[in-house]
Image (cartoon, helix red, strand yellow):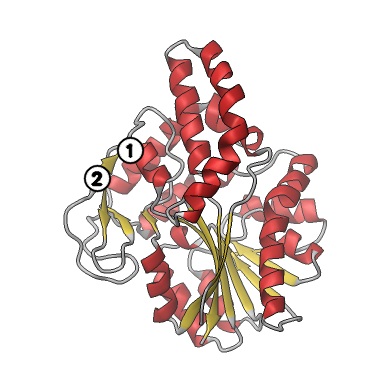
Amino acid sequence: MSVEKKFGKPFGNLNSMKRNFFENNDGMLAMADEMAGVLSAQPKRTHCKICKSPLSAPLFYSHGLGYIECTNCGHLNSEFEDTDVFASKVYVEDDYSKNYSSSDREEYEKRITSIYVPKAEFLKESLQKEGVENIQILDIGAGCGYFVAAARRLGMRAMGVELSENQVNYGNAMAEEEILTHVGLTDSIGFIRNTDANVVSAIGVLEHLIHLDENLSAVRDNPNIQYLYASVPMFSFSTAFEAANQHCYNRHTGGTHTHLFSNRSVAYMAESIGFTVAYEWRFGSDINDLYRFLTVSMAKNDNEAFAAYFSDRFVPLMDKLQLILDESEFSSELHFILKRK
């Protein structure tokens, strides 16, 4: 079966929604550095997160951590293991959710409309091509419920499970109904095993799962699940931009991103659970990252006026430039739908 591919998505108001990345670079960088410190205290990673092949020396270093490209599947692994201790520290004790929760209903609605409705439309339109009309979704790592809410607005049945109790409470309050359930670190596995949903979605989640193998095995072993819809961060141009800008916040190879996917590692993951890649949508934020690094660096060098001059000329080009990177299939984000064989 050939993969149906889609490329590009306008940035729209992404810069305004990620304003904190620009205005609080030092604070965000300090947060990422703190998480890197927790990660570097964990055991060394010896085998690939996806295919379990032995790992060799790091390909490069960024923000104090080494990154190793798997020679078998191309997955990019940090040199240290993501462990239960790491997860407990960065997801529970430090309440990482505070960095992503919107402050009011207007912001909540804006994120649903501009970011998550297009994701839900991609899923619905793709499955309609498959002849699937009754779409029922279990969303794991659902956060504040943005994707669940978007899917429900498009007529799909959806519910989510989430580790952060704060995000669950916030999402249910915004939705004014119980669309999210609070779970423990490994409880999502049981939900996957027992769901009667025909789709499991994981939007920006697979890279955060400490027990990724167990979650994928649960998908494989539940015949009700015919599709896995996910978005993942990719080994990409953003990776290089971050390695070259050590004084800027590293959203891609920092924080809780302890490994990055490649085209080959996504295909390997699909094959390992008896699925195949059916649909892809590539739209990264590499050009946005490059723009942020340039303007933050100019501000640090007291060149704010020139940063504004540069922005007036660069911002109108960003969508076109990003599309070139997306079509190269080496951009920072991939949405994909896996189909059971």
**C-beta proximity under 8 Å, tags 2 and 1:** yes
Residue 134 location, quadrant: bottom right
Query: Spatial distance from mark 2 to mark 1, Cα to Cα?
Result: 8 Å
Of residues 328 and 206, the one drawn nearer to the viewer in this rendering: 328
Residue 47 is left or right of residue 280, and the answer is: left
Judge whether 262 appears above or below 291 on screen. below
Say which residue appears at 54% left-offset and 86% top-offset: 222
User: Where in the figure is residue 194, as x and y percent of width and height?
Assistant: 59, 83
Q: Residue at x 41, y 64 (%)?
A: 263
The residue lying toward the viewer, choosing from 8 and 195, is 8
Q: Is residue 145 visible?
A: no
User: Which residue type carries mark 1?
Assistant: Ala
Q: Is residue 336 above or below residue 82?
A: below
Q: Quadrant of residue 239?
A: top left
Q: Residue at x 35, y 42 (%)?
A: 240
Counting other residues with Cα less than 10 Å from the Cα at mark 1, is it few (<14), some (14-19), or many (20 or more)? some
Query: Where is residue 265 drawn, in percent x and y?
Result: 37, 67
Residue assigned mark 1: 243
Q: Amino acid at mark 2?
A: Phe
Would you call the spot at circle 2 few (<14 residues within 10 Å), some (14-19), or many (20 or more)? some
Residue 261's tag is none
Residue at image location 52% in from the left, 14% down from the top: 306
Classify residue 265 as left or right of residue 43: right
Residue identified by numbered label 2: 60
* Badge 2 element: strand
Residue 29 position within the rendered picture, expressed as x and y whole percent measured from the top left: 43, 32
Q: Quadrant of residue 99?
A: top right
